[in-house]
Image (cartoon, helix red, strand yellow):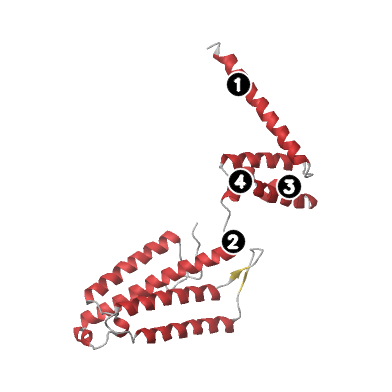
Amino acid sequence: MSEEQPRNAQAGQRQKQLEKQRRQASGSALSKYGLTRKNEEFMYQLNKQLDRLGVPSDKKEEMTRETIDKLLAGQKKGQTARTLFGTPTEYAKELKNPKPSEAQVTKQSIKLLAIDNMLIFLSIFTFMFGLMYWLSPAAMQTKNAGTSGITAILIIAITGGAIFGYVAMQVQPKRDADGKGTTKKPLWLRILTIVAGLAIWLFIYMLVSLLPDAINPRLNAWVYIIIGVVTFIGDMYFRSKFHVTGSLYGASRPANRK
């Protein structure tokens, strides 16, 4: 026990010496930028955290350069590193896993709404036709399947999901650059966008009704009902998993995936 204590003390001393040397080397490398002492310390700790997170050296160099530029700009306004970035640990995580840009968020939101609306339309049309043909089997005997054919339903659901996902994103309020408020497009433009989207979808609806039965077969009523129920349950799971709102079932906007 007595032999281990001096050994541990020596190891601790060597560790302190290495840490001191690293700090001196880091300070020398950063001194040319004209950072304050606190900002140099922030950069030293940030580099340690980036290393701990396994950030590649080329990316780390780019991140370091951008951070130093922001620190220098902040120094002129009296802003500290903590004010600008928080703790080195927090900022290192943010650098490695940056938050999506507004454009990326919008793109992701449109995709989520499109998938959600597609599932909704698929569940509505399949359940509606399945119920109708179950209650009135004679309706199944019509010569042409038209929009009740499975291919037509799929096309209507997919295009309707994409169109109304895009429309929903266009008509909802946009967050201002400062993040403190929202801006709405003019009412006439929002109405025009909705009408245009509906017109395009109805045109597609009419076109698919002309599909030949060979590529647009009508399925059994119970198959349609089962597809409708399963798709509805699947959409509820999808909405819960990705926190989607703002479509035919939801409120005003999509909450993005975390």
- Identify the mark nearer the N-term, 3 or 2: 3
Q: Do the residues labelled 1 and 4 touch (CB within 8 Å)?
A: no
* Residue drawn at point x = 33 percent, y = 73 percent: 123
Vertical position of residue 130 compared to residue 236: above or below: below
* CA gap, disc 3 and disc 2: 24 Å
Nearest to the observer: residue 142 or residue 125: 142
Q: Report the amino acid beneath label 3.
A: Thr
User: What residue is pinned by disc 4?
Assistant: 92
Q: Report the amino acid beneath label 4.
A: Ala
* CA gap, disc 2 and disc 4: 18 Å
Indicate the position of residue 203 as horizontal and vertical percent values: 42, 86
Q: Which mark is residue 80?
A: 3
User: In front of the other: label 1 or label 3?
Assistant: 1
User: What residue is pinned by disc 2?
Assistant: 101
Q: Report the amino acid beneath label 1.
A: Ala
Classed neighbour count for the residue bearing mark 4: other residues with Cα under 10 Å, few (<14), some (14–19), many (≥20): many
Q: Report the amino acid beneath label 2.
A: Ser
User: What residue is pinned by disc 1?
Assistant: 11
* Residue drawn at point x = 46 percent, y = 69 percent: 113
* CA gap, disc 3 and disc 4: 16 Å
- Determine whether the residue tagged by mark 4 lies in a helix, strand or loop: helix
Q: Is residue 233 visible?
A: yes
Q: Are marks 3 and 2 in contact (CB under 8 Å)?
A: no
* CA gap, disc 1 and disc 4: 29 Å
- Identify the mark nearer the N-term, 3 or 4: 3
